[in-house]
C-alpha cells in the first residue's frame, strides 16, 4: 500500500475518531451527570435517614458492592447464594470469550493463578480459534463465490458485473442480518427479558467482537448449559460470517481502487503519448521548414554564381 494511501487512511481514521468522540460525548455526558446527581442524592438521604451510619461506613459499603459487582457476583438474594460465575459451564463460556477476543469483561480472573494461566491460554487459543474461524469462513466464502458466479451469469444480461457484485453483497448481508441478528435477538427478547433494541445492540456488539459486557446472556437462565452451548455455536458461525462479509467488502473496494488506479495510469500514458506524437509532428514540420529554407538558400547561391558580370 502506497504511503499516500496510508496517510489518507490515517487521516480518515483520525477524523472518524474525532466524530465519534464528539457524538458520544454529546449523547452520554448529560446522562452521566444526571446519574451522578442521583447517586449523590441517594447517598445523602441514606445518611440522613440512618444517622447511626457514618459517611466512612457508607463509603466502605459502596466499595464492597462495586468490588462484588466487578467480580461478577449477582447481588440478588434469589441467585447470589446458589449460583457461581466460575462453575464449569460458566468457565467454558468465559474461555470462549477469551479465545474469540470478544472479552465481555463481566467476569475476569482475580487470582494470581488465573491471571497467570490466562496469558499462555490466550496466546495459544486465539490463533487456534482464528484458524477455525478462518476455515469456517473459507467454506462459507467458497459457497458464496459459487453462488456469486451463478448470479452474475444469470444477471449479466440485465446488469453490469459491478452491480451484480453489489447485489450479491446485499443478499449476503441480509442473510446475516436476518438469521444471525434479528432471529437471535428475538430469542434473547424471549429468554432474557431484554427489549428488542437491546437484543439487537447486544448481537452487534458481540459479533463485531467489541464485547462491552454490559449485557451478557445466560445469567439467569434455568437451562444455562444448553443455552450457552447454543450461544457458543452462534458465536462461531456469526464471527465467521462477519469475517466473510468484511472480506467481500474489502475485496470489492480494493477492486474499485485498482481499476481506478489503472484507468488513471492509462489516461496518463495516453496523454503523454498524445503530447509525444504532437511533439514529433511539430519537430517534423520544423525540420521540413528548415530543409525548405536551406534548399532555397542553396538555390539562391547557385543563381548568383551563374549570373554574368553584366547581370550582376
Image: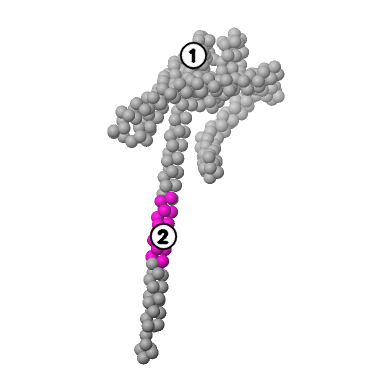
Q: Position of residue 52 (x, y in %)?
A: 69, 20
| Residue 250, above or below 285 | above
| Residue nearest the viewer, comparing 154 with 209 | 154
| Residue 266, above or below 213 | below
| Residue nearest the viewer, comparing 143 with 215 | 143
Quadrant showing the C terminus: bottom left
Q: Main secondary structure of the magenta part?
A: helix
Rendered image quadrant of residue 71: top right
Secondary structure at badge 2 equals helix
- Residue for badge 1: 230
Mark 1 or mark 2, which has the lower sequence index?
Answer: 1
Q: Seen from this angle, which residue lies furthest left?
A: 157
Q: Position of residue 301 (x, y in %)?
A: 40, 79
Magenta stretch bounds: 269-287
- Residue for badge 2: 280
Label 1 – label 2 distance at C-alpha: 74 Å
Camera sees residue 213? no
Question: How many callouts does the rendering have?
Answer: 2
Camera sees residue 24? yes
Secondary structure at badge 1 equals helix
Amino acid at each position: 500500500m502506497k504511503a499516500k494511501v496510508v496517510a489518507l487512511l490515517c487521516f480518515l481514521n483520525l477524523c472518524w475518531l474525532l466524530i465519534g468522540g464528539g457524538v458520544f460525548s454529546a449523547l452520554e455526558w448529560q446522562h452521566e451527570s444526571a446519574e451522578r446527581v442521583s447517586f449523590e442524592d441517594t447517598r445523602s438521604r441514606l445518611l440522613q435517614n440512618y444517622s447511626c451510619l457514618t459517611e466512612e461506613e457508607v463509603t466502605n459499603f459502596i466499595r464492597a458492592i462495586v468490588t462484588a459487582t466487578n467480580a461478577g457476583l449477582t447481588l440478588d438474594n434469589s441467585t447470589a447464594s446458589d449460583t457461581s460465575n466460575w462453575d464449569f459451564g460458566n468457565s467454558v463460556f468465559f474461555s470462549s470469550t477469551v479465545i474469540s477476543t470478544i472479552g465481555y469483561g463481566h467476569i475476569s480472573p482475580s487470582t494470581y493463578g488465573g491471571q497467570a494461566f490466562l496469558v499462555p491460554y490466550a496466546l495459544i487459543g486465539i490463533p487456534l480459534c482464528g484458524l477455525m474461524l478462518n476455515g469456517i469462513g473459507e467454506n462459507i466464502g467458497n459457497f458464496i463465490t459459487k453462488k456469486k458466479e451463478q448470479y452474475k451469469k444469470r444477471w449479466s444480461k440485465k446488469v453490469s458485473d459491478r452491480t451484480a457484485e453489489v447485489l450479491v453483497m446485499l443478499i449476503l448481508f441480509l442473510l446475516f442480518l436476518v438469521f444471525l441478528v434479528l432471529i437471535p435477538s428475538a430469542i434473547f427478547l424471549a429468554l432474557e427479558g431484554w427489549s428488542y433494541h437491546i437484543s439487537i445492540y447486544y448481537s452487534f456488539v458481540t459479533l463485531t467482537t467489541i464485547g462491552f459486557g454490559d449485557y451478557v446472556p445466560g445469567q439467569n437462565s434455568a437451562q444455562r448449559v444448553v443455552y450457552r452451548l447454543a450461544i457458543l455455536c452462534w458465536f462461531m458461525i456469526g464471527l465467521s460470517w462477519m469475517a466473510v462479509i468484511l472480506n467481500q467488502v474489502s475485496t470489492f473496494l480494493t477492486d474499485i481502487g485498482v481499476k481506478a488506479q489503472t484507468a488513471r495510469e492509462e489516461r496518463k500514458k495516453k496523454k503523454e503519448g498524445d503530447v509525444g506524437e504532437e511533439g514529433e509532428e511539430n519537430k517534423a514540420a520544423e525540420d521540413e521548414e528548415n530543409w525548405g529554407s536551406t534548399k532555397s538558400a542553396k538555390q539562391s547561391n547557385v543563381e548568383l554564381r551563374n549570373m554574368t558580370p553584366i547581370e550582376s
